[in-house]
């Protein structure tokens, strides 16, 4: 087993364990258990908009060049950290919730279309999508939580979800691409609902 496949297997296992920890709701209350790590870990997992965006980005990554596909989970984490940094620096992003909804919609459309885009454009899109999510995560950090532990929690969840999406897409692409397209369309429809909701 290569280091890359071991990493992907562990990340997929972590995502599976986190997903069975409870039901996905839009934005549940977050406590400071574990100094904020649990809150950071739970926010992407139990916020349906965040969950769908990260899974969609993972699904999208499988149609891209091999080099880009491998770094997409890291780009997603980078975008999250950038967005969080902006929020904590006091930089307001207009329309954060709308930006989150559009990231879900557009990532879903890219998956449904089985789109393959230039690496530079795809990389910028992934980071831009995740900036909105990171900004929202930072704004909703529980009072008294450790910033470092909260960052570690949502970074781990983001990494696990995007890797899980990538693995799911890889499995579907070798069997039934129509299911992959259908997942993309369903994610895009949810993004549209978020945008008008």
Image (cartoon, rainbow, N blue to C red):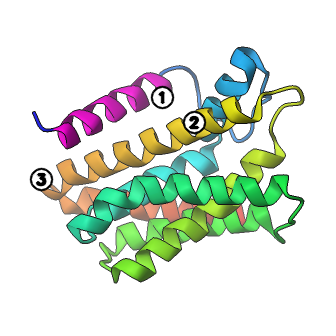
Give the label on residue 168, or none: none
Give the quarter of the image for residue 89: bottom right
Along the line of sight, the residue nearer the viewer: 117 or 67? 67
What is the CA distance from the residue labelled 1 to the residue labelled 2? 7 Å
Residue 111: give x, y in percent of width and height. 37, 67
Tell me if 153 is positioned left or right of 39 in this view: left
Q: Of helix, strand and loop, which one carries label 3? A: loop
Quadrant assignment for the N terminus: top left
Q: Which residue is mark 1?
A: 19
Q: Residue at x 42, y 75 (%)?
A: 122
Residue 153: give x, y in percent of width and height. 60, 32
Classed neighbour count for the residue bearing mark 1: other residues with Cα under 10 Å, few (<14), some (14–19), many (≥20) = some
Q: Are marks 1 and 2 in contact (CB under 8 Å)?
A: yes
Q: Which residues are magenta?
A: 3-19
Give the quarter of the image for residue 63: bottom left
Q: Which residue is mark 2?
A: 45
Q: Does residue 193 appear in this view? A: no
């Amino acid at each position: 087993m290569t280091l890359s496949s071991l990493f992907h297997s562990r990340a997929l296992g972590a995502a599976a364990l986190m997903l069975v920890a409870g039901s996905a709701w839009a934005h549940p209350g977050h406590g400071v258990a574990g100094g904020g790590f649990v809150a950071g870990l739970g926010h992407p997992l139990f916020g349906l908009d965040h969950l769908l965006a990260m899974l969609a980005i993972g699904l999208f990554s499988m149609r891209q060049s091999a080099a880009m596909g491998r770094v997409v989970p890291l780009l997603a984490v980078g975008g999250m950290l950038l967005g969080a940094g902006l929020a904590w620096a006091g930089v307001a992003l207009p329309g954060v919730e709308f930006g989150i909804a559009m990231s879900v919609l557009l990532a879903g459309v890219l998956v449904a279309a089985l789109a393959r885009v230039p690496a530079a454009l795809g990389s910028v899109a992934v980071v831009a999508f995740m900036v909105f999510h990171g900004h929202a995560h930072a704004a909703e950090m529980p009072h008294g939580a450790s910033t470092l532990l909260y960052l570690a929690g949502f970074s781990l969840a983001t990494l696990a979800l995007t890797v899980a999406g990538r693995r799911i897409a890889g499995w579907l692409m070798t069997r039934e691409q129509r299911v992959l397209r259908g997942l993309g369309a369903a994610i895009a429809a949810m993004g549209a609902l978020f945008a008008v909701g």
